[in-house]
Amino acid sequence: QVQLVESGGGLVQTGGSLRLSCAASGRTVSRYTIGWFRQAPGKEREVVASISPNINHTYYPNSVKGRFTISRDNAKNTVYLQMNSLQPEDTAVYYCAVRSPGYSGYPQVTQYEAWGQGTQVTVSS
């Protein structure tokens, strides 16, 4: 069973940057698709990035494309989310999770498991 722990959140001004980390234990995450998600108060959880195993194919929704970058360090069993040009609408709790086996295509929240506890990102205007 894999355990994921997110870190790196905080308070940042509009236009600033943060790098989130998703540290894994119990399983080698290089073998799995890892996703980053966020959930703002009163809103549904949404995907902001995902990275596939092997060829490291990445996915971003239009809302973060060009600003967020997902990457992995297999030696550290950690996945990162670099967030640049942050905007107030990026304020949310950010989570990482592992995609369950057997799924492909567009990443959806229901396909993921082993959610971390989340890390708060607040962007002030």
Image (spheres, rainbow, N blue to C red):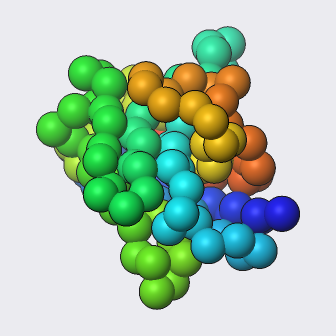
Q: Residue 36, image x and y in percent?
A: 51, 44
Q: Residue 41, image x and y in percent?
A: 65, 21
Task: Answer left or right for 5 relative to 82.
Answer: right
State how many labels appear. 0
Q: Is residue 13 above or below residue 37?
A: below
Task: Answer left or right for 98 relative to 70.
Answer: right
**The C terminus lies in quadrant:** top left
Q: Is residue 117 above or below residue 37?
A: below
Residue at 62% across, 36% down: 102
Residue at 41% across, 76% down: 73
Residue at 40% across, 40% down: 49
Q: Nearer the viewer, residue 9 or 3?
A: 3
Quadrant position of residue 110: top right
**The N terminus lies in quadrant:** bottom right
Residue at the farthest bottom position = 75
Q: Residue 86, image x and y in percent?
A: 29, 40
Residue at the farthest left position = 66
Residue at the farthest front position = 102
Q: Residue 2, image x and y in percent?
A: 76, 64
Would residue 95 be seen by someone viewing this image from the given angle?
no
Quadrant position of residue 63: top left
Residue at 21% across, 41% down: 67
Quadrant position of residue 85: top left
Q: Is residue 100 above or below residue 11?
A: above
Task: Answer left or right for 73 relative to 41.
Answer: left
Would residue 113 be seen by someone viewing this image from the given angle?
yes
